[in-house]
């Protein structure tokens, strides 16, 4: 129940405003997901924020390429792009890792720096920048409020680890260099 309304009551209210069924369901699903990210007992604005720097290790199985983000489907006569099942499942797993790491703390509101080292499973060609989007979107609302707070970003290939391929992501406060202020 959100704002005193059940899931079906919220959908019915949106339909009464002229919003089509699938769009109403998507809007309610987004609202439920947003509410789920927030602490049920402490308002997000008054919660202690996450302690930075924070290091997360994301297994290779969760690093779904941005090239596999959407799958095409047809609803009625309209072609639609929807999040692929693999991408959605991986995003949920990364969110779980992040929630466990921050415990009950709220997301930081400060500018952040993200540094990631990716350990590849093999010698094949991998475009590591395609893994960044799923990680940044998954951390949004948990580690930082919005991924537009990422002020400095570094993703690098750190080598090969056949036994434990992964991304090691460090989120820290962004600190402007003193050199920039002295010029």
Image (tube, rainbow, N blue to C red):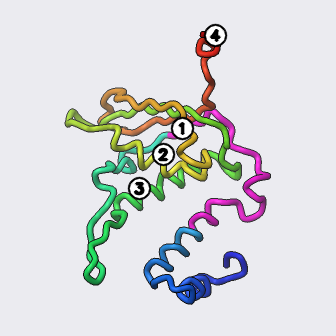
Could you classify mark 1 by the number of other residues whose Cα lies within 10 Å: few (under 14), some (14-19), or many (20 or more)? some
Checking the image for residue 90, the label placed there is 3
Q: Residue at x 41, y 61 (%)?
A: 88
Distance CA(mark 2)–CA(mark 4): 32 Å
Q: What secondary structure is found at the residue carrying circle 2? A: helix
Tell which circle, 2 or 4, labels the residue nearer the N-terminal end.
2
Q: Closer to the camera, 146 or 123? A: 146
Q: Which residue is mark 4?
A: 182
The answer to whether the residues at label 2 and label 1 have Cβ atoms under 8 Å apart is: yes
Task: Say above or below: 152 vs 140.
Answer: above
* Local secondary structure at mark 3: helix
The residue that disc 2 covers is 136
Q: Which residue is denoted by mark 1 in the rendering?
A: 150
Q: Earlier in the sequence, mark 3 or mark 4?
A: 3
- Indicate which disc, 3 or 2, sits on the residue closer to the N terminus: 3
Please tell me whether residue 2 belongs to the stretch shown in magenta: no
Q: Nearer the viewer, mark 3 or mark 1?
A: 1
Q: What's the magenta region? A: 33-56
Disc 2 to disc 1, C-alpha distance? 9 Å
């Amino acid at each position: 129940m959100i704002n005193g309304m059940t899931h079906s009551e919220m959908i019915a209210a949106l339909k009464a405003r002229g919003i089509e069924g699938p769009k109403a369901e998507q809007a309610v699903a987004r609202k439920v997901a947003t509410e789920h990210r927030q602490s049920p007992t402490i308002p997000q604005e008054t919660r202690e924020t996450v302690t930075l720097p924070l290091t997360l290790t994301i297994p290779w199985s969760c690093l779904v390429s941005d090239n596999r983000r959407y799958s095409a489907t047809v609803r009625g006569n309209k072609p639609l792009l929807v999040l692929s099942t693999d991408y959605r499942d991986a995003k949920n797993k990364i969110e779980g890792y992040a929630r466990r790491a921050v415990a009950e703390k709220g997301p930081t509101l400060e500018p952040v720096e993200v540094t990631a080292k990716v350990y590849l499973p093999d010698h094949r060609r991998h475009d590591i920048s395609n893994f960044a989007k799923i990680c940044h979107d998954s951390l949004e609302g948990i580690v930082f409020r919005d991924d537009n707070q990422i002020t400095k970003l570094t993703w690098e290939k750190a080598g090969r680890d056949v036994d434990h391929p992964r991304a090691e992501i460090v989120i820290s406060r962004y600190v402007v260099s003193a050199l920039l202020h002295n010029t």
